[in-house]
Amino acid sequence: MTVIVLFGGLSDERHVSVASAQNIVRTLNGPRDRETAQPRDPVLAWFWAPNGSVHDVNCDDLLAHPQPFTDDFHPSRPAIWPDLEMALDTLPVDDPVFLLAFHGGEGEDGTVQRMMEARGIPFTGSGSASSAAAFDKERAKESVEGRVRLAESRVVEDARDIDRAVAEMLVRYEKIVLKPLAGGSSRGLFFVERGGETPALENVPYLVEQFIAGRELTVGVVDGEDGPIALPVLEIETDPGLSFDYEGKYLGKGTREICPAKISEVTRDEAQTAALAAHIALGCVGYSRTDLVAADDGIYFIELNTLPGLTTASLLPQELRAAGIGFREFLEQQVAIARNKRETVR
């Protein structure tokens, strides 16, 4: 079995993808936790470049890239394939398992997953149907409706309708949030208060949603031998006047992450139950991370990520540590799940 870490992609979240790939490659190619463990072949790393070509990357070059969250990664080796489909059709290794380190775009919305499913290639994470449903925030909310508490929202398909939708929502709520219907890493997020100005939006569709005031929580779920289990709850604190945007999440500006969260057992249990319910309702496989808000009247579902960040600064790895689960152990379990899923389909 050859493990190939596939990262990069065409979306504006590829910087996070590069950082996740660095952490994965560093962990799996590093020294093992137990001296008596059987050695395994080093993992490979493939970079899906913004122009669509695919590079077989020198892992040392990947690990040496100094500023993955802000600077583009430029592989030293030339591309081997002009596009990902050709790379998958001419696989140069036997018995591959792809460890997906994508975030956003075609890497997370089910597109890449469909490519691999059509070819019978095993990969980590959820399948194409679950990935597509979770990536579309409105479809995700429809899938979990009746299982978790939801904020009121509506989808705006035409930028010319944003002002009217915002005005109608602000009649009922003092504050709302505008977020891309499909996207992640807190990019393109806007908050509008009653009496404030609506930002000019070009890349629609957008979700116009009631802002839920409360404590920001996130809960990872991982599949185990006896089914999915919820990880310890993590709380995100932000400085007054700031939000948990890209700079806060990955550059540490004005935010603090507390795991396990200092919340009551009742709130903890409700948050973990909501994350498990969302994971199951969307048909996730392997792992997921659900973002929630603990408001005065209970826990609200915000969104679910089928491929949450796996960087050294990401939330899911922090929860794994709090649960006593090693990152290598987690990665190897995901590879095993991917391979077993392929064998089951056969």
Image: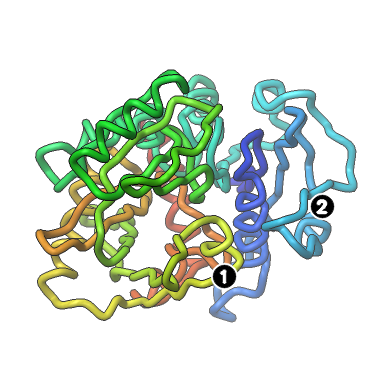
Residue 284, located in which quarter of the rendered image?
top left
Residue 306 shows up from this direction: yes
Query: Nearest the camera: 110 or 296?
Result: 296
Q: How many marks?
A: 2
Q: Earlier in the sequence, mark 1 or mark 2?
A: 2
**Drawn side of residue 58 relative to residue 285, left or right:** right
Residue 135 position in % (x across, y down):
41, 35
Q: Is residue 127 at all visible to an observer of this figure?
A: no
Q: Image quadrant of residue 11?
A: top right
Which residue type does callout 2 highlight? Asn
Q: Which mark is residue 58?
A: 2
The picture places residue 152, in percent across and down from the top left corner, at: 20, 39
Between 164 and 204, the one lying in front of the other is 164
CA gap between label 1 and label 2 equals 32 Å
Nearest to the eye among marks 1 and 2: give it.
Answer: 1
Q: Position of residue 54 (x, y in %)?
A: 75, 33
Q: Position of residue 74 (x, y in %)?
A: 83, 47
- Neighbour class for label 2 at 10 Å: few (<14), some, many (≥20)? some
Residue at which label 1 appears: 253
| Lateral position of residue 262 relative to residue 258, left or right | left
